[in-house]
Image (cartoon, rainbow, N blue to C red):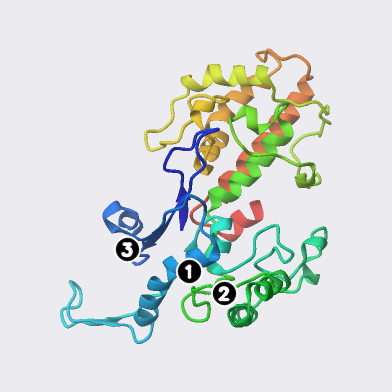
Amino acid sequence: MDGINPFGNRHGGKQVTITFIILICLTLPISLRFLPENIFIFGIAPGPKEPTVHQVNWVLRPLVDQLKILWNPGLQLSKTCLYPHGRHIYCAILPFIGDLPTLRAALGFASHSATRMCPYCHLKRSEIQNLDHSTWPKRTLSDHRKSADDYLKASNAKVQDKLLKENGSEATDVPVDELVDILRDAANPPENLAYSCLTSDLAASSTFGLETLFASNLSSSDDDVIPDMYINDWDGEWTSIPEQPVLDSQALKFINQRLPHISVPSWIRCAIPVLGKASRGRLKADEWCTLFTIQLPLVLQLYWNCHTSPKKELSQAEESSLLHNFALLVSLVNVGLKRVIDAQLINKY
């Protein structure tokens, strides 16, 4: 489930969202799974804004009604290619994929700014500084089902708003107890997680912010800054970096001069030709990943090299430290975007 802007992702353009509900058959091999002829667009929420939980329910209800039948009792097929005498099949949602706002709306959770902002625990927003996860009261499917039932039985909207504030969840047409385990089977695509990481990192290092550098409407806040994390096997001596930004208009000019000369594989369709131009619109998650994992690693090692960089405010040790830090970020993104993961990669991450 995801939304698009039909007028294009242009900075300062019309902000309209059309939301699609798309079904993909996971029994097909990956090579066939995402072909246009094998993707089923079940429903469309026309916009112009992102749908609320109630509006999502209107679109989901017909799907849920059909899935309930396909799950119990299932469907008997009289004949298939591999089963000439027929077979009995079942259907379930596994997993439910979307970005975080979409997942919250579809599965009945409150927004990230609500009193109970977390879909996995009952921690209050006022306790967001509590990093001891052992003290977080965990959510359960039975709790979520009860909260949804209480929300449905509420006598008026005022009571519903009170329940939403207390529980952080409301009624949804996704049958959590039958078709999907929303606490385990709701997936936020890795590129969206990388998007948050990369935009936060660059916001901290840019002199004029992401709004100007990448023609984005994103904003950064001092409240979002994460304390420095240290790695035991740090490669090389750490050199503190001056507080002034390390990416400015001079860096942008240097980067833009070299981006057109970078050749990327033909299967990568989201290479960025220029940065800082409003005509390019806001970067999407996959464009951020391409920029940070392919394009910027080739350019910034030149920019932060004391012999070729046009910027001389930083010492060689400071530039080397910046490059090491950026290389670790790229490595983290590459591991996080792996389609297949194992214990070794988890430890590396």
- Report which residue position mark 2 lands on: 171
Q: Secondary structure at mark 2?
A: loop
- What residue is disc 3 on? 28
For the view shown, which residue lies furthest in the bottom direction?
73
Q: Amino acid at mark 3?
A: Leu
Sequence-first disc among 2 and 3: 3
Front residue of 329/138: it is 138
Q: Is residue 190 above or below residue 207?
A: below
Residue 57: assigned label = 1
Q: Nearer the viewer, mark 1 or mark 3?
A: 1
Decide if residue 58 is on the left or right side of residue 319: left
Instruction: Give, as a three-letter code, the residue at label 2.
Output: Ala
The percent position of residue 296, horizontal first and vertical second, equals 58, 29
Q: Please, is residue 197 above or below residue 293 in the view?
A: below
- Circle 1 — which element? helix
Residue 229 in percent (x, y) is at 78, 46
Residue 130: x, y in percent? Answer: 82, 62
Gap between marks 1 and 2 measured at Cα? 9 Å
Q: Which mark is residue 72?
A: none
Q: Is residue 264 above or below residue 250?
A: below
Q: Residue at x 79, y 46 (%)?
A: 223
Amino acid type at circle 1 is Asn
SS at badge 3: loop
